Image (spheres, helix red, strand yellow):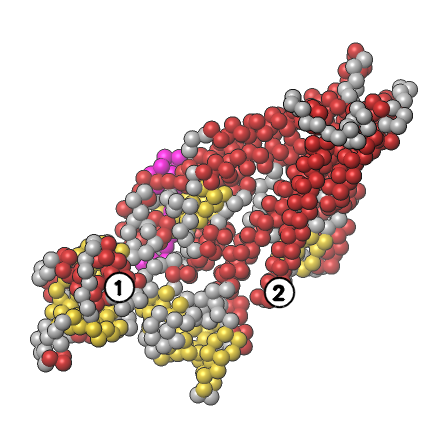
Amino acid sequence: MITKQFNIGGMSCAACSSAVERVTGKLSGVTRSSVNLTTGILTITFDEQALSDEEIIRKVERAGFQAELHTDKNKEEKKEEEAEMEDEVHRTRTRLIVNIILAVPLLYISMGHMVPFPMPLPAVLDMHHSPLNFALAQLILTTVILFNGRKFYLVGFKSLFRGHPNMDSLVAIGTGSAYLYSLVMTFLIRSDSTAVHHLYYESAAIVVTLVMVGKYMEGRSKNKTKDAIRKLMELAPDTACVLRNGEQTEVPVEQVRQDELILIRPGDKVPLDGIITEGRTTVDESMLTGESIPAEKEAGSEVIGGSVNYQGAVTVRVTRVGSETTLAKIVKMMEDAQGRKAPISKLADTVAGYFVPAVMCIAFIAAIVWALLGHDAAFVLTIFVSVLVIACPCALGLATPTAIMVGTGLGAGNGILIKSGEALEIAHKADAVVLDKTGTITEGKPAVMQIVSHEETEEQLLRIAASCEQASEHPLGRAIVEEARGRGLGLLKAEEFQSVTGQGIEAVIGSDTYYIGNRKLCESLGISPGPYREAAEEIAAKGQTPMFVIRRMGSPEDGGKEEAVPVGIISVADPVKETSRDAIARMKELGIQVYMLTGDNRLTAEYIGGKVGVDEVVAEVLPQDKANVVERLQKEGRCVMMVGDGINDAPALVQADVGVAIGSGSDIAIDSGDMVLMKSDLNDVYKAIRLSNATIRNIKQNLFWAFFYNSCGIPLAAGALYAINGTLLNPVFAGLAMSLSSVTVVGNALRLRRLRL
């Protein structure tokens, strides 16, 4: 058995993806067939001995869709593909704007006489003075609008004729019938002016325009799903400085070979994975590990492509190139996760395959029966069009998107940006919430937590340390400086600043030399932590970083010979957000199991996890491990909501049933998430679940009303009452009933706005 992926073109709704799954699933040798509508990818597992790629492609094409083998594209190819998608969205936007502009005068002409207050028309367009001009004006405007929306007719009728009707088929039949019926009535106006009352041009035009709005929004959303992957690829630089024959040569990253030596200068991005062979430095790996505190690196340490070199220049032997690099694997993982993530099928899309042929059969049967009973062509046409018009998919099509639109609007008002209707629909099912630690449960940047000194006051020790750290670019040093400035402490003048890579810093204030750094710095200076040993151990047990402040009285230039001694400790850590504990307690009240994932060490992770009350802590995990943990929970039957803020969280956000990004996090995490918490408050996860519950309830009510109107209206339109008491449903009333069903659905959806989260 082998699993392959194919790019599928021409799909427009869940009915299309179901059709592709159905026709490919029936092929000999196929054990699994799954289509992702969002990415347009078919993932199929089959026996190569029984089936070939060409046979799969031919089968998909016979069903009315395009297919080609999915291949991994390089940066340039992906950029070209994205540019094509952007152009298509832009063209759709242009056509949509034209349609909206034309729809305004069309509505004014066709319905202006129906409103309570006067909306005058010139006599040349007035239906009473010039009925033919009145009809022709609508015909011209509607024809242009329908031409701009021709894709619905091309796709809809093609799918219908291939035996796989979808929502486009429903739109095409309903609006096409209304248009053709109106066209016939327009020709009859010369002989019968009352035919002017049987025009449905505006119904056809407005339905097409509204559906185009939905398709445009859908196209934009699909492009957004690609943004995260594009930005992730841009993390790695395009060139690398390679050491060849003793010379430094700048070459494209694609030309670097495994085991070659590359030079990485301070401030450079690491181009490829490798092992440091020479030099010491500090590397910011937060974009991959999520941890805000930089990692100390020396000879023998591994560096990851995409991370940023802070301080020293290092020589690195390349260990992985091309698709084998950590960054490339994360990109591939995200693409695979997007391909596997099946969208929730809208009920309207699911039933479209049955609803469309059923309505058409009813319309044809009713028309034939009445014709056989001896009724004239006008009567038969009235029956046929009434059935199709009353079954127009307006209410059915509006049932889900209107509720989602109101729900997303309510979420936005509460600082919860919801990027897809699927996320809003599925969030209420979540029974496992996976939280990243850094930036999600915690603030995401180091801050001073504690100051311990037996020799100086707290403020004086902080002033000294901050004065020394002013020139430092290290995040721990910046945290000390920010704390001093936040307390309004005036900083002293520090001279002869030096950075000791992997240990700390050295600076001179007045006649004294100060050293600020970790335990390694104490060891290199040959001094003991002394009375601060116990405090340092307690601080480390809390998952915090103890920074020793060491003083040597008298600068070397002044001949100062006094022994260096520690005068205090400043602990720095990533503090827990004030709202995290309460938010996690609320989630657990809903019966949700809460997990914490982090790349941080187990000691820190266990301390933070216990402090906020999560059910399980998974520490020291790599980006791919986070996605694997989410996948494991899904295989156990859990509906997983992943909440994170870093680039390292992106694969897990995509893998999860619902990915929730923290608004203060990285752009890549925000692009990868289905929801964004703008206030960066975990309480909004609870609110999002409540909002999802209310929206799903509203959607079910909307679908009930949509089907209720169709169930009652179609028999009436088919002439059920005429057989009983001679009453025939006029297409005007069919259109009115259709509009009423839409009004009911929209009105019910608007009730959501009153919900208090």
Badge 1 amino acid = Gly
- Whether residue 619 sits left or right of residue 540 in the image: it is right
Question: Mark number for residue 77?
Answer: 2
Quadrant containing the C terminus is: top left
Query: Is residue 58 rendered magenta in the image?
Result: no
Which tag is nearer the camera, tag 2 or tag 1? 1
The residue that appears at 44% across and 66% down in the rendered structure is: 306
The residue that appears at 55% across and 33% down in the rendered structure is: 403
| Residue 414 image position (x, y, % from top left) | 43, 38
Compared to 31, does 427 lie above or below? above
Q: Quadrant of residue 433?
A: top left
Quadrant containing the N terminus is: bottom right
Seen from the viewer's position, the closer of residues 526 and 511 is 511
Distance from label 2 to label 1 (Cα)? 43 Å
The residue that appears at 46% across and 71% down in the rendered structure is: 271
Q: Magenta residues?
A: 584-601
- Whether residue 396 sits left or right of residue 579 in the image: it is right
Q: Earlier in the sequence, mark 2 or mark 1?
A: 2
10 Å neighbourhood of mark 2: few (<14), some, or many (≥20)?
few
Badge 2 amino acid = Glu
Task: Give the residue at mark 1.
Answer: 477
Q: Is residue 362 in view?
A: no
- Whether residue 661 sits left or right of residue 113 in the image: it is left
